[in-house]
Amino acid sequence: MNETVSLGRIAGVRVGVHWSVLVIVVLIALGLARGRFPLAHPGQSTAAYWALAVLTSLVFLASLLAHELAHAIVARRNDVQVDGITLWMLGGAARLRNEAPTPGAELRIAAVGPLTSLVLGGAFTGLAVGLDALRVPGLVVEAVAWLAGINILLAVFNALPAAPLDGGRILRSFLWHRSGDRLRATRGASAAGRALGWLMVAAGLAAVLLGGSLSGLWAALVGWFLIAAATAEARQAELRGVLHGIPVSRVMTHSPVSLPAAVTVAQFLAEAPYGRYRHPAFPVESADGRVAGLVTVELINRVPPQARAMTTIGDVMRPLSEVETTGPDDMVMDLLPRLDASTDRRALVLDAEGRLIGIVTRDDIGRIVTWLTAAGRTRD
């Protein structure tokens, strides 16, 4: 889930939000302002209900962020690189660049999330009791009590032993420790995730069809997400098993055709696609021969026809700082999640001196996987 708006960095971790966060904010605020708050404390103004409901929903998002930050901080302490955190409609996601090196590290990274939510739930509970003792308006106490309950519920739900929930990661760490086989452990946790997902879908649809409760649609939606995420996680594990131990140098396209940054878009288009420029993306070199960035046909197509004679490739390229790069000896299975999260789905391969020696795309990896799968290569 890619971020729509960046919120900067917290504790050194990049944080962003996806536009779908607005959905959960609206749903929570609507449920509180039109439901729970008026029922529990009638007689207040509509503006008071809505203002407190919106504030409560934002504090809940902050609770989700704290949950994911805990994952990210513990992951970094266990030698797992963190690309960032994105909040979206169904919660939050910490993007980890590589997997935990040991079952113990996996356990620590997974367990800290529910533990953080449980601590937050306890803190909000204590705050609600204290505010009530101080005779603070009951509407405010109700909001804090709701935050306490939702965080405790979040902790319990995330602790369920089913991937991709935190409890599923805990289950995988146990199975991994017991069997010594990470791939088999992932299969077991993913199977549990699909079972829980189907149970939630069935329960949600039953609530809608038999009980007439539209809240069942939310349970069915979460269940469907669990099924899809658990299935994707199992496939990703199988893929990592196939690619285990394969360096980028075995997969990349060597000595890719590059473009000088000073070439105009019109000159490039005059030679493509029948000359040497017949690919959808090209590394770009500066005047001194160093890699400056990457340009794609999609970026070139954005240049208006009347401006192409005066616009250079260097003007439209994606600078090197925004392009995924890797080394020839890096492992393909470590590069794969970075490619999936990148804008161009490709990476430039640079040697130790920063010279361009190759390019690798998601399609390159897909072809290798097809061949290795046909050859029956699957191992952890």
Image (spheres, rainbow, N blue to C red):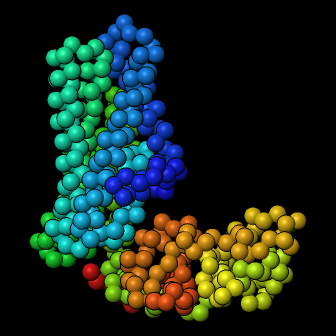
Quarter-wise, where is residue 315 in the image? Answer: bottom right
Q: Is residue 254 visible?
A: yes
Quarter-wise, where is residue 247 in the image? Answer: bottom left
Quarter-wise, where is residue 242 in the image? Answer: bottom left
Q: Who is closer to the viewer here, 364 or 345?
A: 345
Is 277 above or below relative to 299? below
Identity of the residue drawn at 23% across and 68% down: 78
Can you give x and y, in whole percent of width and height, for residue 102 in the image?
Answer: 19, 73
Question: For this view, does 133 lie left or right of residue 328?
Answer: left
Identity of the residue drawn at 71% across and 69% down: 316
Can you give x and y, in whole percent of width and height, for residue 82 in the image?
Answer: 36, 64
Q: Residue furthest right?
A: 306
Is 45 above or below relative to 231? above
Can you give x and y, in whole percent of width and height, for residue 297 in the image?
Answer: 71, 73
Question: For this view, does 39 lie left or right of residue 47?
Answer: left
Q: Is residue 214 visible?
A: no
Identity of the residue drawn at 30% across and 47% down: 66
Q: Quadrant of the C terminus?
A: bottom left
Identity of the residue drawn at 64% across and 89% down: 289
Is 111 above or below relative to 261? above
Q: Who is closer to the viewer here, 6 or 23?
A: 6
